[in-house]
Image (cartoon, rainbow, N blue to C red):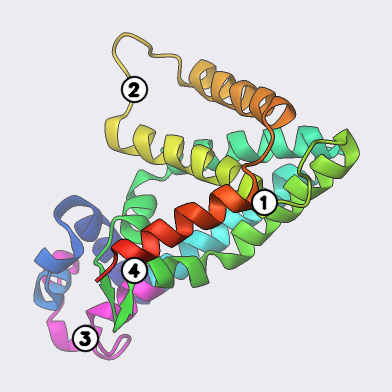
């Protein structure tokens, strides 16, 4: 029963949006009264929270399985980056539920909630990036900003592909993924990080502009 509830809710959240779906509608979808759902979940939020946790756990398992197949840190980075994008494309429903869900996550801002939930996955990517930087003697190997840039670029491409799907004029998604990774790699090899003074100035202007 719990699995039926989660499966129905996952599809309905992804198709219609979390806010638009009610517990009564979820119950109707699986052929029960909404009172049955309360035997497993206290409210709709806890359904989304479990779906989100399951998805992140699967993403971590996917990362670990791919990383275990490659000895060289660089190859692990490339393979896990591809793997993240492929996972998101293969599981668009789960991806949408976690990352396109409501801004208010039971009193916590979505960005903070997702950041905390996804920490095990993000920490793996950062550590792997540092391993690569050390192995390949990249510049700025101690600068986490570069690791963030790699992560944001890969995750951003995954998000775009989930939203847009295959591009009519460029149907080979694997080619786009490989080109993105190659471009990122060329960049981290050649481009020095911003001086700390420049980062400080940017942060200062950003802070000053806030009310």
Mark 2 touching mark 3, by CB under 8 A? no
Q: Nearer the viewer, mark 3 or mark 1?
A: 1
The structure residue drawn at horizontal position 34% and vertical position 22%, both measured from the top left corner, is 166
State the SS at label 3.
Answer: helix
How would you rate the neighbour count of disc 3 (Cα within 10 Å): few for under 14, some for 14-19, many for 20 or more? some
Please tell me which residue is depicted at 71% across the width and 51% down the height of the picture: 143
Q: Is residue 138 left or right of residue 205?
A: right
Pointer 2 residue: 166
Mark 1 = which residue?
A: 125
Q: Can residue 203 be seen in the rendering of this structure?
A: yes
Of pointers 2 and 4, the one earlier in the residue sequence: 4
Query: How far apart, in angstroms, are the residues tagged by discs 2 and 4?
Result: 28 Å
Q: For the residues marked 3 and 1, what is the alpha-carbon distance in whole angstroms?
A: 40 Å
Range of the magenta residues? 28-49
Q: Are marks 2 and 1 in contact (CB under 8 Å)?
A: no
Rendered view: 17 above or below 76: below
Crowd rating for badge 2 (residues with CA inside 10 Å; few <14, some 14–19, many 20+)? some
Among numbered discs 2 and 3, the one appearing first in the sequence: 3
Question: Residue 110: which disc?
Answer: 4
When asked about the image quadrant of residue 149, the answer is: top right
**Quadrant location of the C terminus?**
bottom left
The mark that comes first in sequence, 4 or 3, is 3
Q: SS for tag 1? A: helix
């Amino acid at each position: 029963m719990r699995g039926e509830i989660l499966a129905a809710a996952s599809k309905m959240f992804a198709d219609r949006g979390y806010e638009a779906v009610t517990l009564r509608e979820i119950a109707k979808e699986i052929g029960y009264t909404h009172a049955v759902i309360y035997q497993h979940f206290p409210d709709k939020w806890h359904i989304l929270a479990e779906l989100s946790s399951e998805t992140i756990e699967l993403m971590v398992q996917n990362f670990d399985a791919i990383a275990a197949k490659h000895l060289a840190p660089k190859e692990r980075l490339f393979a896990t980056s591809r793997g993240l994008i492929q996972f998101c494309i293969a599981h668009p429903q789960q991806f949408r539920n976690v990352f396109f869900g409501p801004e208010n996550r039971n009193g916590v801002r979505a960005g903070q909630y997702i950041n905390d939930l996804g920490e095990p996955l993000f920490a793996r990517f950062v550590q792997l990036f540092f391993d690569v930087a050390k192995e390949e003697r990249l510049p700025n190997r101690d600068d986490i900003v570069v690791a963030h840039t790699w992560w944001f670029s890969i995750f951003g491409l995954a998000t775009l592909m989930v939203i847009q799907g295959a591009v009519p004029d460029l149907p080979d998604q694997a080619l786009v993924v490989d080109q993105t990774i190659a471009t990122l790699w060329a960049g981290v090899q050649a481009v020095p990080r911003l001086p700390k003074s420049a980062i400080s100035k940017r942060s200062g202007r950003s802070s000053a502009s806030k009310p």
